[in-house]
Amino acid sequence: MQFPQIPEQKKYNNRSHMTPEQEAMLAAINDPDNLSKKNEKILRECRDFYLKALKFLKNIDLSKINEKDAKDIKSYLNTIFNYRGVLRNNIYFKYLYRITLVRDHFLEDGKVRDPGFIGYPPLDIIKKIGIYGRANSTETTVLYCSFSENIALLEAKPRVGDRIIISEWIKESDEPFVSYPILSNNIQINEGLVKAYRSLDKTLSGYPDLLKRINMLYFDFIGGEFVKDIPVVHINKFEYLFSAYFSDKVLTGEENKAQDGNNFQYDCIIYPSIAAKHRTDNLAIHPNSVHKLRINSLRDGIVTATNYDNCQEEDFDINSQISVIGGKETRILASIENGRIIWSDD
């Protein structure tokens, strides 16, 4: 795979441990009205490079790449995006929902007892299966949740005959989650997304045009990868390579570590739900932030009917009382004691 050549402006120098591009960006931010000819030239050349490189990346058929290709692409991304656009949005919510497809190895005498099977997958399992998610690579794990039960069901799309557990999670603290919002200017139906994009546009309005353009190329590329609705056919789900790469950088990269080196600045990434046609959002939550939630209810049952293809707009509403599936509920949560799930029929 022959990638577009990296320009000198994006290569680190020993003098400042920064790239000429980074130095030019910093100068433009600190004094936007007095951008020097030298820095203007650097930013223009970088903008032209991004236009070429991002077009090249978008044209890669990720469904046909192999593991070496994936490794080379990520290495190239590390060189292209040797900075991270900083976004931060506090989000307030009470409940989240998640669907767990029950596997045989989850069971003890026919029942799931370990709450760990309800939450995010263990990292060793992620590494073993080698499959990418929209917001995680094969080296990371996150807790995927939705703001409504129906959206969680639409995302998971369990089939008739599947045994599932619907979990409701509650955030008891009034403190917000700090999120990294995924933006897209092409989506007008999601009110929160539109507001966030306008806020970003307002923030960047004080920047020189070249710097604003570079930032928007960055955010539009990321947003486009998160909201793309394409068939996922690769055995490793490499179609998610770009969005997973950026998720890893945001949630587990060095930039996310707080000054104490242990805690993390971002609790989650918030991104538009493909299954809900972008009308609402999903969360990919960092494992270190899951302790801020607790399991509030569990319902174990068998899917007997689905209605995914005939959803109406009201089905996407957070308060919808009509489920997109039919099912036979077998048991509900009674309590969790000493790290063990106690069911209503125990």
Image (spheres, rainbow, N blue to C red):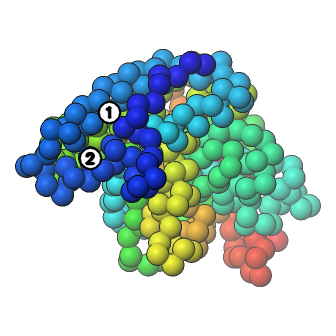
The residue located at (33%, 55%) in the rendering is 87
- Disc 1 residue crowd, few under 14, some 14–19, many 20+, Cα 10 Å: many
Q: Position of residue 289 (x, y in %)?
A: 54, 68
Up/down of 195 relative to 262, above or below: above
* Type of amino acid under label 2: Ala
Residue 269 visible (yes or no): no
Horizontal and vertical percent position of residue 225: 45, 33
Q: Secondary structure at mark 2?
A: helix
Indicate which disc residue 24 carries: 2
Seen from this angle, which residue lies furthest left? Answer: 33
Look at label 1 and name its amino acid: Cys
Of residues 214 and 125, the one nearer the viewer is: 214
Check the image and report above or below for 259 versus 149. below
Q: Which quadrant holds the C terminus?
A: bottom right
Between 194 and 239, the one lying in front of the other is: 239
| Residue 30 screen position, x and y as percent | 18, 58
Q: Which residue is mark 1?
A: 46
> Considering only vertical position in the picture, is 275 above or below 122?
above
Q: Quadrant of residue 332?
A: bottom right
- Do callouts 2 and 1 mark residues in contact (Cβ within 8 Å)? yes
